[in-house]
Amino acid sequence: MPKQKTEKKRSHKVIVYSTPGCPWCHKAKEYLDDHNIKYTDYDVSDDQEKSQEMVDKSGQMGVPVIDIDGKIIVGFDVEKINSLLGIEGED
Amino acid sequence: MYDLVIIGAGIAGMTSAIYAARKRMNFLIISANVGGQFLESGEVLNYPGLIKTTGAEFESIMEKQLKFNSINPRIGSVKKIEKSKNGYNLITDQGEFEAKSVIVATGARAKKLGIPGEEKYKNKGVYYCTICDGPLYKDKAVAVIGGGNSALEAADFMLNIAKKIYVINIMPKPVAHEYLQERIANNPKVELINNASTTGILGNGKMVKGLKYRKIDSKMKEYEIDADAVFIQAGRVPNTDFAKGFLKIDKDNHIEIDCTTQTSKQGIFAAGDCASGHEYQYIIAAGQGCMALLKAARYVANTR
């Protein structure tokens, strides 16, 4: 009997830069939670260092900014998130 | 072929969908996003039945209600609508869909001013959503451009965040709910500048540093103010471009409807901020979403 291959899901380093009460930030985090993606969330309204980090990475100040393995997404862009995390789109 | 396609998943479209599901209609709801303008709203204090909520909380409840009714909005954009043999054909970036009836509930988007610096400094100090981006400007000076409900709500939201708020209003006075006008007028952080037309966004090449405006009086003099952020809340533009040339549209880009939400084409209904009526409230959009669905259901039944 051939050996069964077990596929290991690749883990990703995900950082979310957000502000409290920002609905798009909330949607982005909810989406990641729904897909069991672990992430670190920084509240950039309260953390000057992380706010500057976000600006350095994305070149702008709009939130949310999502860093997936060093690739930067500005806004809740489901297609880009899916593509970088290997999530299949829902019909 | 569907009985019905609902275009848009803000409160109007979601209301139509809930009613459609409970009437067991064969329908599709397609939208560029789920939530619409909920996602740009802060406090909501005047929706009957909800003493106090936020746009995000309200939207979350509505999404749960969609799930409860087994409704799954399809994410996509409608590019064009045209007549088909048995109804209407919707051309979208997800393919083409045919339906006997259509409800257009595409809402509206923030109006851009088209002034120098607006595009250059977008997300670099120029924003259209205070809820999202306002908290970044703790103890800073900010400007809000506009004089209606959205502008005063934006200024109100920033009262506990910014150290100074300029409200640059092109009209002689604000046109907004009285409670908002009171809050703004009574707060020393706010400087309301009426009869002022914003003429440009100023910056250092990387970030916003202020704006300039022209006073609308006999002298028409230009002034500058220092601000780290500018929140543009100067009105809404209905999302109706895809329907131009097919449905009757008024001079402000709203789809013309009668009091039953019927548009200029039989079997097509429009609800919410994309439709004529010119009063932009959640309760109106929800009510019209319901009316549109009931009328669409009757129309479909009568064409069987």
Image (tube, helix red, strand yellow):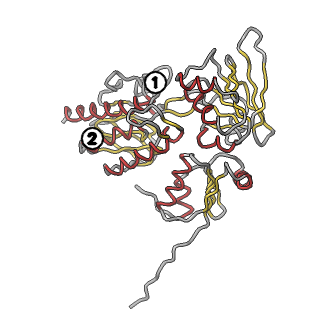
Q: Is B160 placed left or right of B61 in the picture?
A: right
Name the quadrant of the N terminus of chain B: top left
Residue B223 vs B204, above or below: the answer is: above
At which x and y percent is residue B73?
A: 39, 48
Depth order, front residue of B231/B261:
B231
Say few, some or many: other residues with alpha carbon within 10 Å of mark 1 (under 14 / 14 to 19 / 20 or more): few
Q: Label 2's element? A: strand
At which x and y percent is residue B128?
A: 61, 36
Q: CA distance from mark 1 to mark 2?
A: 29 Å
Looking at the image, which residue is at 37% across and 44% down?
B29
Depth order, front residue of A35/B240:
A35
Choose mark 1 or mark 2, whichever is in front.
1
Name the quadrant of the C terminus of chain B: top left
The residue wearing badge 1 is: B279
| First in sequence: mark 1 vs mark 2 | 2
- Type of the residue with mark 1: Glu
Q: Is B205 placed left or right of B289 in the picture?
A: right
At which x and y percent is residue A73?
A: 62, 54
Identify the image quadrant of residue B96. Answer: top left
Identify the image quadrant of residue B92. Answer: top left
- Type of the residue with mark 2: Asp
The residue wearing badge 2 is: B3
